[in-house]
Image: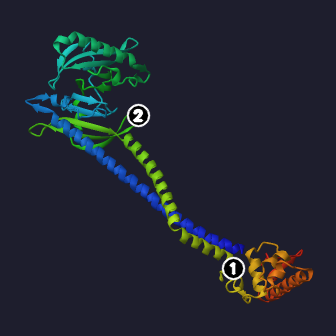
Amino acid sequence: MIMAEEQANSKYTKLTVKVLFVVGIFFLLYLVVNYLYLRWALNKDIISGLARTDDKIVSDLAYKNGRWDTSSYVNDNQISQTNPLYVITTDGFIIDREQPISGLLDTSDFKFNSSFPKPTTITSPAGEEWRIYSNGIMKDDTVVGAVTVGYYEPEQSALADIDRQLVSAADTISSQVIISSNGIDTSKITAKNVNIKVSYEIVDKFNHALQSVGGLPSYIDRSYVSEWLMEKYTTVKEQNTGALFLVYSKPILDVSKTPIGIVVAGFPLAQINNTLQKQLIFSSVSGVIDVLTMCILLVYLLRKEISALIEKASRVVQKTFYVSQRSGSFGFDKDTGIVYLTERKMEIPVKSKQYYICKLMFSKPNKNWENDEIMDKLPPEILEVEAGDMYDNPDTDIIRKRARMIYDSIRLLNEKSNKFFGLNLILLQGGTYRINPNA
């Protein structure tokens, strides 16, 4: 009986495992496809966004007779300056550079940036008028960098006030610069600490632009520009942090289709990864909830069918097992009245005394059965007494008669099983009966 239960349980366990495995594979496939699709969609949106930014800037800039007109670009509020952005001429003049990526077009001419010890008005190659002031960054009486600040299109009548703003901004920025053994640290400086009308750039003596906000006029070696004079997408790793950026470059062409500058826009890929991670978590949680909800709904809708299946499975377990070709199989088939031991089988007449005793004892093959327990479970007609006599008026003679009937029936069973199996089917131990555990 135990082997029957184990085989039945094993059957349904394997089926359950298979179903769960298939569901798990499909759920994993759903997550992978969902992840890949979202990654593709996000990359496509970013590429489209970078292309729109570059196209908008190119359309805003005007170049005629060797002169630039940046007024439309400067006044265009649709262009975001929160991500890396470069607008540079082929001569190396930086029209604009916002949130530069360390290692990408991030150099500036230190000599130019530090050449305004007094507030000075200049006109840039882009035709823009700026009021500029520079303040040296000192370490042990040695200049190691420069803070350059500027005011776009200054009003002549307000120069004194503008100059005070520039000097104050330069002093504020300089006070927040940290000099360390590794160089100049500008991590404590943010644009919100500086007057919104003041643009600034911080450059070290090795011509590295450490921070640049507001498109302050500056210069870069033109050799760095030449490799970007083509339309392309590429992934760039920031030198300082190792962060990845998706970058799109687009050349600016004059009327003769000759490159006169470049626009480079970048987007941090960490934002994509964060979005994908959140979406993956959301998809996993929502997917699990959906599967559980579906299972609960199916159980509710198919409760009758499931109940019938459970009842059928229960009957299969109670019936015991029959595996005719499997070595070690042992059990009793209550439908046919056959006792199985490996390939051998012994038939017991259905509804005989031996049949009902086998049916009862095989229901719990490890149990030691007392005489009175067997008597209580057997049908009254088998005990050859009326039902009322069995339960209401049992006397000593009747009990003795029933016990003898049980003993004789088991003896006949054992005689028969010895012929078929070479062993006693039921053992008598200390006044109790049990199925032979060695069978």
Location of the N terminus by quadrant is bottom right
Q: Residues within 10 Å of mark 2 (few under 14, many from 20)?
A: few
Residue 116 coordinates in the image, percent (x, y): 24, 14
- The quarter of the picture where residue 167 lies is top left
Nearest to the observer: residue 297 or residue 433: 297
- The amino acid sitting under disc 2 is Thr
Kindly indicate the quadrant of the structure image that contains residue 53.
top left
Q: Judging from the image, what secondary structure is the residue with disc 1 in?
A: loop
Residue drawn at the location 87% of the way across and 82% of the way down: 403
Q: Furthest residue to the right?
A: 396
The answer to which of 349 and 328 lies nearer the viewer is 349
Mark 1 residue type: Ser
- Mark 2 element type: loop
First in residue order: circle 2 vs circle 1: 2
Left or right of 313, for residue 131: left
How far apart are labels 2 and 1 at the CA level?
67 Å
Residue depicted at x 69% and y 82%: 334
Q: Identify the residue shown where x is 67% and y is 78%.
A: 321
Please name the residue that numbered disc 2 is placed on. Answer: 241
Q: Residue at x 12, y 38 (%)?
A: 258
Vertical position of residue 118 compared to residue 60: above or below: above
x, y percent for residue 386: 81, 85
Numbered circle sitting on residue 327: 1
| Relative image position of residue 174 (x, y in whole percent) | 36, 16
Residue 320 visible from this viewpoint? no
Find residue 142 and report its image quarter: top left
Q: Residue 5: where, in percent of width, then height?
A: 67, 72
